[in-house]
Amino acid sequence: MKKNLKNKIALIIAVLLICLYGIFGIPSGVSGKALLSAISSRIHLGLDLQGGAHLILQVQVSEAVNAETDNSVQELQQDLKKANLTVSQVIKPDPNKPDVIRVEGATAAQNDSVSTLLGGTKYANEYDVSSGSDNNWTLTMKPVFENDLDKRTVDEAIETIRDRVDALGVSEPLIQEYGLGANQILVELPGISDLEQVKKILNSTARLEIHAVDGGPFPTEDAALQSVNGALPPNDEILPYTGDLSGSNGAQYYVLERSSIVAGSDFRSADPGVNSNTGQRTVNFVLTDEAGDKFWDYTSANIGKDMAVVMGGDVRSVAVIKGAIRDQGLIEGAFTQTEVMELSKLLRTGSLPASMNYISASTVGATLGADSVREGVTAAIVGIVIVMAFMLIYYKGSGINADIALIFNLVILLGIMGLSATVGLGLTLTLPGIAGVILTIGMGVDSNVLIFERIREEIRSGKAASAAVDQGFARAWGTIFDTHVTTIVSAAILFIFGTGPVKGFATTLTVGLAANLFTAVFVSRVIFEAHLNKLKAGEMVSI
């Protein structure tokens, strides 16, 4: 009995047209060059095929811990002052232990009040508080909070890097936590060849800070240290001045308060400009509401005193506070045009919560990428031709069925890769991904071999052609499904824990296997049934 295959054929044609659109879109012409351009615009190539920059960054999370405890020291001093509680000092006693704060020298009469303040939820949520002799207290950051801070630091660094990469105009970047090391980030930027420029943009902490000046300028670091009697207070630091030295006799150093008044994360926006009076380049900034209130309080209470603009551990500019400033101001100094543009861009895209070191940084040239594409495609084509020839020779007429299903499998795979760009998934084809395509070809042939051998067994047992085909597909389905599901699970694990190129392999393998289930079981069967409809009674299929 002949089967009605119109709906099945219509489904196959619809899938074919959708996938062809995914591969080519709407090409500008039918020439080979136009079609190739259409394919390249639809299917995104990974870093190893397109060329670009590959970096692994180590986030210095200890700096975030240090900044957090610096803020806590400042808050403690303010809270004690508001509560009219007197202590001799609030310090971080050991530079090698940035997670420890000490409160020293409370009066005996205020001991209980200070203890109550420190034991409140504001500090007890972050620190373990212990009291010692002579009315001293030690606050040690809780491991759970510190681990959470480390994770938040890495997440914030990833988002900031992503903003900066977007500002660079890079398409299809890969920015994610690197699973092979603690607090590490993987960055892959296809099409970028200037590695030094990338490193300069990505690794600049842009942690522009404004600090109170306790002393300076001094001609040497030793002179700066001697100004505080040779023992630097725990809440101070000595930093070099790298601004305009044209009017000085050489290097200069300043003694600054360690805690910043405002930091890079407090800036809402920043734009480059030029001071019309002095001709110096400036960065005009706007602070967040909270930071603006804080800046107003400080500048109101310290008119006539100096404050320093610090960037990257260097003093870039020193200015006298002439009046109270709330949320708007400008940073003026000996900046080059490039520096002022980059500083404005970095402040707009956010401050990195901590600096980063490079574990590895390399580039893949476009020529090498083109060679990889050519050799990978050549390997895939040679593999397909050999497999198709084998199927034709070994399975005769049914080999045509297998070859059609195999080609359809590749069309679906590439079509899904192309369609992913239009729906925002952005699947990329990498060199290991091409290996995944070749492996998919092998899996597709394996499925056809299982089905065809089952059909041959049914024919040898004396069954008619239609019954043999039905039984062959039915009995091979369980084995095909099991092998594909287990392989897809393995590919999913590679995708979750692998890096970019490995993910490319997992992606093409998974998509190819899903497509193979459709082509080997559904498309191949429809072709068989269409062929059976044309056979005469008692005629056998060629297999």
Image (tube, rainbow, N blue to C red):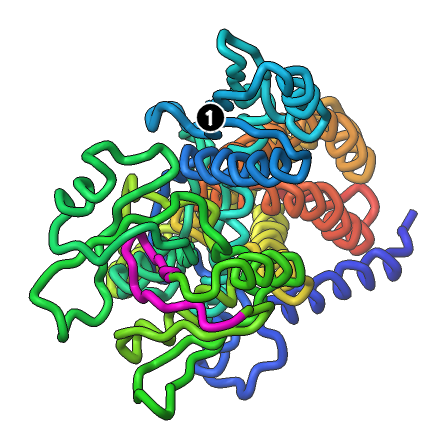
In this figure, which residue is indicated by the disc labeled 1? 99
The answer to whether 57 is drawn above or below residue 42 in the figure is above
The answer to whether 115 is drawn above or below residue 344 in the figure is above
- Front residue of 40/221: it is 221
Q: Is residue 488 left or right of residue 194?
A: right
Which picture quadrant has residue 282? bottom left
In the image, residue 411 lies in the stretch drawn in magenta: no
What residue span does the magenta drawing correspond to? 306-323
Residue under the point 57% across and 29% down:
86
The answer to whether 94 is drawn above or below residue 415 in the figure is above
Which picture quadrant has residue 468? top right
Residue 1 at x, y = what percent? 92, 47
Most frequent secondary structure within the magenta stretch: strand
Q: Is residue 202 left or right of residue 469?
A: left
The answer to whether 256 is drawn above or below residue 64 in the figure is below
Could you tell me if residue 237 is visible in this image? Answer: yes
Q: Secondary structure at mark 1?
A: loop
- Front residue of 317/46: it is 317
Could you tell me if residue 445 is visible in this image? Answer: no
Q: Of all residues shown, which one is farthest toward the top? A: 133
Residue 133 at x, y = what percent? 49, 7
Residue 88 at x, y = what percent? 47, 27
Residue 100 at x, y = what percent? 46, 23
Residue under the point 79% across and 49% down:
529
Three-letter amino acid code at the position of disc 1: Asp
Residue under the point 77% across and 50% down:
526
Residue under the point 35% across and 91% down:
277
Q: Is residue 320 left or right of residue 108?
A: left
In the image, residue 310 lies in the stretch drawn in magenta: yes
- Front residue of 274/81: it is 81
Q: Quadrant of the C terminus?
A: top right
